């Protein structure tokens, strides 16, 4: 496997890790106004993601940084053609971060309600728009030979793009519901579990529709048909999706969460495996496609990056594993009394 191919799959992996780690934060935030029935329960939901959310954001920065360094042409075209959608995501993530830090600075119900609403919006918008953006990448973006985007924000809001947005939102809602069931007790725990089970049939339905729609709206299945062994990736993802339901029924919430994580990873890789080596396809002309080969940095740059990645990524993973292990326990009323609590 050459350097371009290695970095292509590392790039996809970084996005997948981001969606797994920050996905449950986005899911919990999107469910805050629905599942949190009082101030104590809402604080438990805040603290279920509070110690981890900023570390999870590191993977988004890493994915963006790798795009810039390894595939600068893709970075340039992506951030110009998807500028409006990406700026909306950025502003929403900023609002979410501010909400987490400001919510309990003032013990006033109106103040807290304001930031609860901001957290809801700051979680729902990215969850939806990430799906819209990636579905449009799978479908193809109207860019010309110079990488100039011929469309508007509303061009991205096509049926397939919106279907991808709903799929990502449901993935994150289920992921967040399970995480809430893992981290909470009592009535909130029950509501988290029930919400995950209620959302699962909708997720399954949208996932099936998305798989079918991809056959009509994209060229994803060309690689799969040329290399039938690749269908194993889809099979593993589908099995993981069904395992979510099985483990939820059994009350094995950690296993359900890991099954959800595998489902999200599979959903991310599903499209890009089908597109490889294309990273940013053009819907105007296949000759305008940006691939891992015509949009990459030099071999020297990719080699240096690979060495650095092999050194520092394991360090980041070790730190994050330690953080998750440290905060693996359930959030209780006693935890809310700590000064550090959200």
Image (cartoon, grey):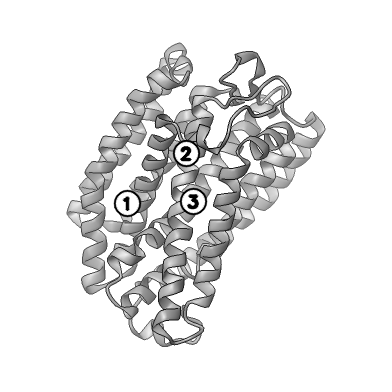
Neighbor class of circle 2 (other Cα within 10 Å; few <14, some 14-19, many 20+) is many
Q: Which residue is mark 2?
A: 132
Q: Quadrant of residue 264?
A: top left
Res. 164 image quadrant? top left
Query: Callout 1: 10 Å neighbours few (<14), some, many (20+)?
Result: many
Q: Name the residue: 60% across, 38% down.
A: 82
Q: Quadrant of the N terminus?
A: top right
Residue 30 horizontal/vertical position (percent): 38, 58
Residue behind mark 1: 174
Q: Is residue 283 left or right of residue 312?
A: left
Q: Which residue does the image show at 60% across and 15% down from the upper left?
A: 286
- The residue wearing badge 3 is 126
User: Is residue 302 or residue 192 the one in the foreground?
Assistant: 192
Q: Is residue 177 above or below residue 150?
A: below
Residue 322 in sight here? no
Q: Residue at x 49, y 23 (%)?
A: 274
- Nearer the N terminus, badge 2 or badge 1? 2
> Which comes sooner in the sequence, label 3 or label 1?
3
SS at circle 2:
helix
Q: CA distance from mark 3 to mark 1?
A: 16 Å
Element marked by disc 1? helix
Determine whether, in the image, residue 221 is placed left or right of residue 307: left
Seen at 66% across and 18% down, the residue is 288
Outermost residue on the top side: it is 226
**Residue 43 showing in the rendered view:** yes
Residue 212 % position (x, y) = 33, 24
Whole-number angstrom distance, CA of label 2 to CA of label 1: 18 Å
Please tell me the numbered disc located at residue 119. Answer: none
Q: Is 165 on the left or on the right of 182, as rendered?
A: right
Answer few, some or many: residues within 10 Å of disc 3's Cα (few below 14, many 20 plus, some between 14 and 19).
many
Whichever of callouts 2 and 3 sits on the residue coming sooner in the sequence is 3
Q: Which of labels 3 and 1 is toward the front?
A: 3
């Amino acid at each position: 496997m050459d350097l371009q191919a290695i970095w292509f799959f590392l790039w996809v992996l970084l996005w997948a890790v981001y969606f797994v780690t920050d996905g449950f934060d986005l899911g919990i935030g999107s469910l805050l106004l629905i599942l949190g029935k009082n101030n104590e329960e809402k604080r438990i939901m805040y603290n279920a993601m509070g110690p981890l959310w900023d570390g999870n954001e590191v993977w988004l920065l890493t994915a963006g940084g790798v795009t810039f360094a390894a595939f600068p042409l893709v970075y340039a075209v992506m951030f110009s053609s998807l500028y409006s959608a990406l700026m909306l995501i950025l502003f929403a993530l900023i609002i979410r971060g501010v909400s987490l830090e400001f919510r309990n600075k003032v013990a006033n119900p109106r103040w807290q309600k304001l930031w609860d609403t901001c957290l809801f919006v700051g979680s729902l918008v990215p969850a939806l728009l990430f799906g819209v953006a990636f579905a449009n990448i799978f479908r193809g973006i109207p860019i010309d030979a110079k990488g100039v985007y011929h469309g508007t924000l509303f061009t991205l809001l096509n049926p397939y793009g919106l279907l991808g947005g709903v799929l990502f939102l449901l993935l994150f809602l289920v992921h967040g519901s399970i995480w809430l069931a893992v981290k909470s007790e009592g009535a909130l725990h029950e509501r988290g579990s029930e919400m995950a089970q209620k959302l699962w049939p909708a997720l399954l339905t949208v996932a099936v529709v998305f798989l079918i729609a991809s056959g009509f709206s994209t060229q994803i299945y060309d690689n799969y048909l040329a290399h039938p062994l690749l269908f194993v990736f889809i099979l593993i993802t589908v099995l993981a999706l069904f395992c979510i339901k099985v483990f939820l029924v059994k009350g094995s919430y950690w296993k359900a969460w890991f099954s959800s994580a595998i489902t999200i990873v599979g959903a991310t890789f599903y499209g890009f495996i089908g597109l490889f080596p294309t990273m940013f396809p053009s819907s105007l002309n296949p000759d305008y496609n940006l691939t891992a080969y015509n949009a990459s940095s030099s071999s020297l740059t990719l080699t240096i990056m690979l060495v650095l990645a092999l050194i520092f990524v394991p360090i980041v993973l070790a730190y994050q594993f330690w953080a998750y292990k440290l905060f693996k326990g359930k959030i209780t009323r006693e935890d809310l009394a700590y000064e550090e609590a959200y």
